[in-house]
Amino acid sequence: MANYHEEEVLGKAYDAALMRRLVGYARPYFLYLLLGLVMLLGITGTSLVRPYLLKVAIDDNIIGTGSAVYEFPDRQTIPAYVNDDYVIEVEGKVYVRSALLKRADKGLTENLPRVTIMNVQKTPVVIEGIVLTHDLTLSTSPSGEISAKDTKGNEYAATVMDKSVMQQYKEYDSKRIRDIAILILITGLVGFLLTYYEIMLLNWVGQNIVYNMRRQIFSHVMNHDMSYLDRNPVGRLVTRVTNDTDTLIEMYTSVLVNLFKDVFMVVGIIIVMLKLDYRLALVSYMLLPLIFVATMLFRKYAMDAYRKIRVALARINATLAENISGMKIIHLFSVEGRMHDEFDKINSVYYKSGLRETMVYAIFRPTMEFIFSMSLTLMIWYGSKGVMSGIVQIGVFYAFINYVRQFFNPINEMAEKYNILQAAMASSERIFQLLDKKPEIINADSCTHVEKIIGKIEFKNVWFAYVDEEWVLRDVSFTIEPGQMVAFVGATGAGKTSIINLMSRYYDIQKGSILIDGIDIRKIPLEELRRNISTVFQDVFLFTGDIKTNIRLNNDKISDEDVRRVSTYVNADNFISRLPGGYDAKVTERGSTLSAGQRQLLAFARALAFDPSVLVLDEATANIDTETEALIQDALPKLMKGRTTIVIAHRLSTIQHADRIIVLHKGKIRESGTHQELLAQKGIYHGLYQLQYKESFIEAEAKREASQEGSFAVLDEKS
Amino acid sequence: MRHYAFLKGFLKKNLWRYALGVVFLILVDACEVIVPRILGPITDGLANGTMDYKGLMRYVWLLTAVGAFAMVNRFLWRWFVNRTSRKADYHMRKMLFDKFMSLSERYYTQNKTGDLMAHATNDIRAVRESLGSGTVLTFDSLFLTIATTIMLFISVPTKLALLGLVPFPMIAVAVFFFGKVINKRFKEVQESFSELTDSAQESFSGIRVIKGFAQEELETDNFMKSAKKNFDKNVALMKVDAVFDPMINMFATLAFVIAIWKGGSMVANGEITLGSFVMFYSYLGSLVWPMIGMGWVINIIQRGMASAARLNKIFMEVPDIKDAPDSVGHFEFKGSIRIEDLTFSYEPDGTRPVIKHLSADVKAGQVLAIVGRLGSGKSSLASVLTRLYNPPEGTVFIDGVDINKIPVSTLRKQIGCVPQESFLFSTTIRDNIAFSDHDLSDAEVERYAKIAHIYDDIIEFPAKFGTMVGERGVTLSGGQKQRVAIARALIHRPRIVILDDCLSAVDTQTEESILTALGEELKGHTSIIISHRISTIKHADEIIVLDDGDVIERGRHDELVELGGTYADMYSRQLLEEELAAL
C-alpha cells in the first residue's frame, strides 16, 4: 500500500551530507564495486572497438584504397613469412601489400615504388602510384601502353593482369573481412557477458545494501521507546522500512556506479575520435556547448515540472483517499457538486502540470535530436571535404558517423538518473531522520544482571505523565511481595494500565523509583526485565502464522512438547486439537477465526511457555461464551501459582480472593486492602461493587467497548 | 476493445488527435528512413571520387532540411499524442471521481479504500499508457519495420537483404517471451514486497507483545526472512531482466557481423558499392528498435486492457440510491416522520434484520430518542432516514411522502445528521463547519460554533477558525471533533436533526451545556437523538429502547423509570457512575 498521505518532500536533488552517508552503506562492498568498475571499463572498450574494426575493414579490405601495395625487386627480397599465395606476380614484377609485413620490416618498403591494384571497368589492373578514386577509365596509347585516367585528367601507367591473379589477391581481403567479422562477434559476446554480469553484480550489491539497511531500520524501530511508537503511525514506520529503502536500490544500482559508465563512454569516445583524426573530432564537438545549454535549460524546466507534478499527484491521491473515506459525509450533506468542482480544480492542476512536462519534453527531445543530426551533418560536410582532398580515409569518415551517434546516448540518459537521484535523496532523508531519533529507554551503562527475578515489586512515590505535566500517576507507592496476587481497580483513566506499562519499563517515570527485587528497574537490562514479566492483554494480539508460533513466538528453545504441555495445562489443548491441522493450524488476519475466549487461552499458554516470575493480567472477560469462561476461570489459578500476579480487574468477582486490592482514582491510590476490608470501608470500592452487581445489558456494552479499544488502552488514559 | 467502453465518448472526440499524432510520427520515421539513402550516395561519391563541392553542399543542405523537418514533426507527434493521453488521464480521473460519488454506502462497505485508490492511480495510468505509448509504439514499430525492410530490399541485392534480416524476428520473439517472464517475476517481486510490508506492519502493530516477551532480536530475524525473500525474488528478476538489453545488443551485433562479412566481401569483390554497404549497415541498425517496440507493445496493451476491464467494471456499477423515476419534486419539509412497521436488513436478501417491526410517529417539532446497546440497530435508523440505505417501500414517510420517492438531495439538504464517528476533512475549521455551503458568513459560522460549544476552543488556536484540522481532524480531540460535527450539521438549519451518539467524547458537564444550547436552537425542529446516555435524552417526547433490533420498551422518561425495566436500570447505573466520577 502506498502512503497517499505522505507529504511529498522534494528537497535538493543532491545533498552532499546525505550522499556521504549513503555511500557509507556501500563501503562493505567496495571491492565488488571496484570489480564492477573494471567490468565497466571492459564494456566501454567493447562498445568502442566495433566502429574502429569496421573502419579497418573498410579501409584495408572492403575498398582496399587504404592498404599500400609495393613493388618488390624480386621474390628473394620478400620476407620468408609472407604467404606465397598472397604475392602477386604480373609480367615478372612482384607485389606485396604492406599489411602482410611485420612491423619491424615496414622499413623495407621505404624506397620501393607504390602501386594500386584495382578493377577498372571490370578489368583488373596494377596502376603505378597511389590512386584514391575508383572512377577511372582505361586507355591504350598507340604504342600499346595502357594507362588509367581519372576524372581530373591525371594519368597513371597501368598493367592489365589476369582475372585469376586478382581473385587470388582478393582472397586475402575476404579472409581479413571474415576475421574482422569474427572479432566483432567475439567483442559482442564479451560485451554481452560483461554487461550481464555487471548489471547482476551491481544489483546484487544494491540489494545487499538495502537488505542490511532494512535490518538496521527494523531493529531500530523494534528497540525504540513505546512513546515514540505511540506517536508515529504504524503505516509511516512501515513505509520507511519498505518503500523508502526500495527507492534506494535504484540509486545504488543505476546511479552510483553507472554514472561512471557514461563518463567512461564519453571520455573513451573523445580519445578514440581524437586519435583517429583530431580535426574531424574537433568539428564533431563544435555543437557541444549547445547541448550543454539545452540540457541546463531542460533540467531547470523539467525539474520544475516534475516537482509540480509530484505535488499535484500527492494532492490528488490525498484528496481521493480522504473523499472515499468521508464519502458518507459528502452524501449526508449533499455536497457532491461542490466536491466535484473541488476535485476538478486539483485534477486540472495536475493536468496542467502534466501538459507542462509534456511540453518541456516535446521541445527538449526533438531539439537534442536536431543538435545531434546537425553535429553529424557538420562532420559529414567537413569529413567529405577531407576525403575529397585525400586527407581523410573513407573508413575513418564512416567510423566518425558511428562514434558521433554513440557520443550522444549517455548525454540523453542523464535526465533519468537525475530523477532517481532526487527520489533517493528524499527517501534517505526520511530514513536518516528515523535512524537519528535514538531511543531514550535503553540499558544503563552499569547494569545488574538478574537471571531469574524473585518477584518483589515496589513503587516508591512514583509520578508519571505521558505528556509534559499531565500527571497520570501522582505519588503512587506500594509494595508487592513475591508470590502475592494484587489487583488494581478503578475507572477508565485512573492509571491502572500505566502501572503495568511502567513495570515493564515501556516508559520511564519522572519522579520516584520502581524497584524489582530491590533493584531499580532502570538498572536491570531491558531484555531480562521483560523476559521475567509476562503480560496478558485484554485484546490478545495474534500473529499471522500457525498456533504453535503464536505460543512460542520466535523462541526456538520452546519445543513442540513444551507448547503442547503448556496448552494442555491452561485448557487450550482441547480446542487447538480440534482445529484443522491442530497446532499447525493457520492463524490468519490477527486470529479473526478464533473466538475471544480461545484467543485468551492462547495468550495464557504463551505467557506460561515463557515461565515468567511476574504475571500481569489485563483481565478482559467480555464476549466470552460460558464454556470457555469456565475454562479460563479454571486455568487462571494454575497460571498464577508460584508467581507474583498483578490483575487489572474489570470484573470484581474475579479478584475477591486477591491478597490485596488497590483502588486507583484519578492517578492516586485511594483505597487498599482485601475485598472484605474495602467493602467495610463503604468507599469507592463499595460503589464500584454495587455497580457491578447491577447486571444489566449496559455492562456488556461497556465491556464490548473496552475490548474494542484494544491493548493500547494507554491512549484513553492519555486523553 | 469493449473494455474501453467507458472511454467511448472521449475517444470519439479525440481520436483525430491521436490520428494526427500518428501521421506526424510516421513523417518522423520517414525522415529516419531517408537518412541512409543520403549517406549511401555520399559514401559512393567519396569512394569513387565523383563527389564535388557543389554536390556535397546539396547533400549537406538535404540532411539539414531532413533534420529540421524531423524536429518539427517530433515535436508535433509528442504534442498531439502525449497531450491527448494526459487529457485522457484527466478525463478518466474525473469520471471515476464522479462515479465514486454516485455509489452508495453499501459499495464502500464492500470495497476497501486501498483497492479503490489503486484503481484511481495504477489502473488509470496503465490505460493512459496503453493509449499513449501503446499507440505510438504500435504505429512506430510497424511503420519503421515495413519502411526499413522495403528500403533494405531496394538498396541491396535480395539475397543479402534476406540474410541480414535473419536475426530480427528472433529479437521480436525474444522480447515478447522475455517480457512475459519478466512480467511474471516482477509480479513475484511485488508479491514478496507486499509480504514484506505485511510483515513489518504486523510486527509494528504487535510490538507490545514482542517487547513484552523480549523478542525484538528474534522478530528482527523473522522480518529479515521476508526481506531475504524479497532479495531473492529481486535477484531472480534481475537474472532475466539483466539479460534483456545485452541480448538485444547481441542480436544486433549478429546482424552487423552478417553485414560486414557478407556485405563487406561483396564490396571487396565489386558486387555492390561501398554506399550500398553503408545503407545496408544503417538499415540493419535501425531495425533493432522497432523489434524491441513490437515486443513491448503487446505487454503494454495487455496491461492496459486488464486495467481498462477493472475500470469498466466500476463504471458499469449501478448506484442503488438514486432518485426514483416517480419521485415527487422538491418540497419544503414540515418535519413530521412516520415509521410503519419498518424491518430493515443490510443483506440484499433481507436476512439478519437489524431493525424489526419498528413503528413510530414523530410530529413536526417533536423529539424522539432511541437508546440501546451497541449493535442494537440504533444507527441503522439514522442511515435509513438519510437514505444512505433505502428502506422497504411504504415504511418510512416524511410529511406523508414515502422517503424513497423524495429526491435524495431534497431529503439530505433538510436533514442535519451528526454521525457517530465525526469525520472531518483536512481543511480549516471554518470550512468544516460551513461544509454544506462555503458561502455561509463568518458570523453564521461563529454563531453555530458557539451553539456547539466549540467557539472557545477554536479562538484559543493560533489560527482561530483558519486552523487546519489535519487529516481526518487529527489535530482536534475527540470531543472537539464531535462539537465541530454538531455545528456542521446545524448550520444549514435543517428541518430534521439526527444526533447519533454524538456527545460520547464530551464530558458530562459540557454535554449538559451543549444540550441546553441545542434545546433552544432545536425548538421547532424535529429531532431524533440516538444515545446510550440517559442524561442526553431525558426530555424527549418519546423514548424507544431497542435491543437487537426489537423495541423492548417505549414511553416518556418518567414512565420508563417507573416501569422499572432495562431503562430504569440503565438510569440508576448512570447516576451511580456520575457519583463515582465526582469523587
Image (cartoon, rainbow, N blue to C red):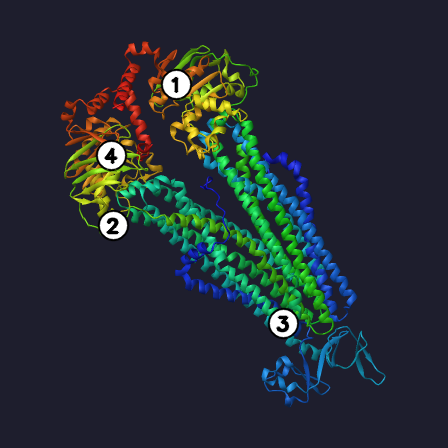
* Residue at 65% across, 65% down: A284
Task: Sort mark 1 into few (<14), some (14-19) or many (20+) by Cα contacts within 10 Å.
Answer: many
Q: Position of residue A291 (x, y in %)?
A: 63, 58
Question: Residue B480 versus residue A510: which sits nearer the camera?
Answer: A510
Amino acid marked by disc 1:
Leu
For marks 1 and 4, give the CA distance.
Answer: 34 Å
Do the residues indicated by labels 3 and 1 lie within the same chain of the protein?
no
Q: Which mark is residue A474?
A: 4
In the rendered structure, the answer to whether residue A395 lies left or right of residue B382 reads: right
Q: Amino acid at mark 4?
A: Arg
Residue B515 tag number? 1
C-alpha distance separating marks 3 and 1: 93 Å
Other residues around mark 4 within 10 Å, as few (<14) / some (14–19) / many (≥20): some
Which element carries disc 4, helix, strand or loop? strand
For marks 2 and 4 on the same chain, the one whose residue lies earlier in the sequence:
2
Q: Nearer the viewer, mark 3 or mark 2?
A: 2
Q: Are the residues under badges 1 and 2 in a single subunit?
A: no
**Disc 1: host chain:** B
The residue labelled by disc 3 is: A276
Q: Give yes or no for contact between labels 1 and 2 (Cβ–Cβ under 8 Å).
A: no
SS at mark 2?
Answer: loop
Which disc number belongs to residue A444?
A: 2
| Residue A68 picture quarter | bottom right
Q: Given the image, what chain letter belongs to the residue carrying mark 2?
A: A
Residue A191 visible in this rendered orientation of the protein: yes
